[in-house]
Image (spheres, rainbow, N blue to C red):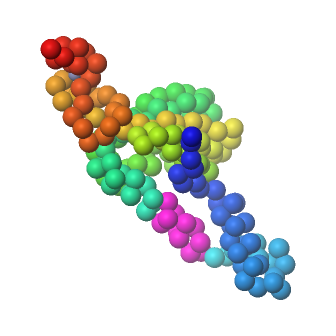
Amino acid sequence: MEQIFVSWDTYEITKGHAEFLRDEDKELSEEEAFSLACGDSDLFAWEWDHIECEITLWLKERDYPSLLVEGHSMGWRGQSGCLEILDCSTSQKFLSFLPKSDCTFTIYEVDKSTLRVENSHHDAPTGEGYLISVVDPCIYCNTVIEVDNYGEDSMCEECEEHYRE
Ligand SMILES: [Zn+2]
């Protein structure tokens, strides 16, 4: 069962904060609360810090793994493509696959070594998808392979056939 790992939506963040402000101060109108939330310059920085912390923790628990990012329906041309992020040590490196524009995204945890990303921005308003898998080099031939149990020595299929005896 997929679970939401982290999400980023500046409208939802602002709306959520406005609701919080109205809980604190019952006198505030919906409009006043929303404009107060919009004027809070620390709000996005605080929320972004939270996302970076969650990602950093995820990476640390997996011993700063190599990642394979497979993108689908990217940008206005709907392109597909792959990106390898080797020895992913920081949340900035982790998020480097996202386009450099205002993104609204949700990252789902598919299983312990797989994440799924739904992202939208002005060049992809209907959304683009990414699948992020923890990968490891094969201990014999160095081919990058997907792993189920990170942290264990992994072999590619060919080497496993070859070295099974
Ligand atoms: Zn191999």
Give the camera-side residue of 1 and 86.
Answer: 1
Give the camera-side residue of 34 and 137.
Answer: 137
Question: Residue 105: horizontal and vertical position, in percent?
Answer: 59, 49
Quadrant of the frame with the N terminus: top right
Residue found at x 47% / y 28%: 81
Residue 154: name its quadrant.
Answer: top left
Q: Is residue 61 above or below residue 127?
A: below
Q: Is residue 71 above or below residue 39?
A: above
Within the magenta stretch, is there residue 119?
A: no
Residue 119: name its quadrant.
Answer: top right
Majority secondary structure in the magenta region: helix
- Magenta residues, start to end: 41-51
Question: Residue 161: horizontal and vertical position, in percent?
Answer: 23, 14
Residue found at x 38% / y 58%: 57
Quadrant of the frame with the C terminus: top left
Q: Residue pushed farthest front?
A: 165
Question: Residue 32: horizontal and vertical position, in percent?
Answer: 80, 78
Residue found at x 52% / y 36%: 130
Q: Is residue 50 left or right of residue 123?
A: left
User: Which quarter of the rendered image does ligand 1 occupy?
Assistant: top left
Residue 117 in view: no
Q: Is residue 27 left or right of residue 86?
A: right
Q: Is residue 88 left or right of residue 42?
A: left
Question: Residue 132: horizontal and vertical position, in percent?
Answer: 45, 38
Within the magenta stretch, is there residue 46?
A: yes
Q: Is residue 45 above or below residue 88?
A: below
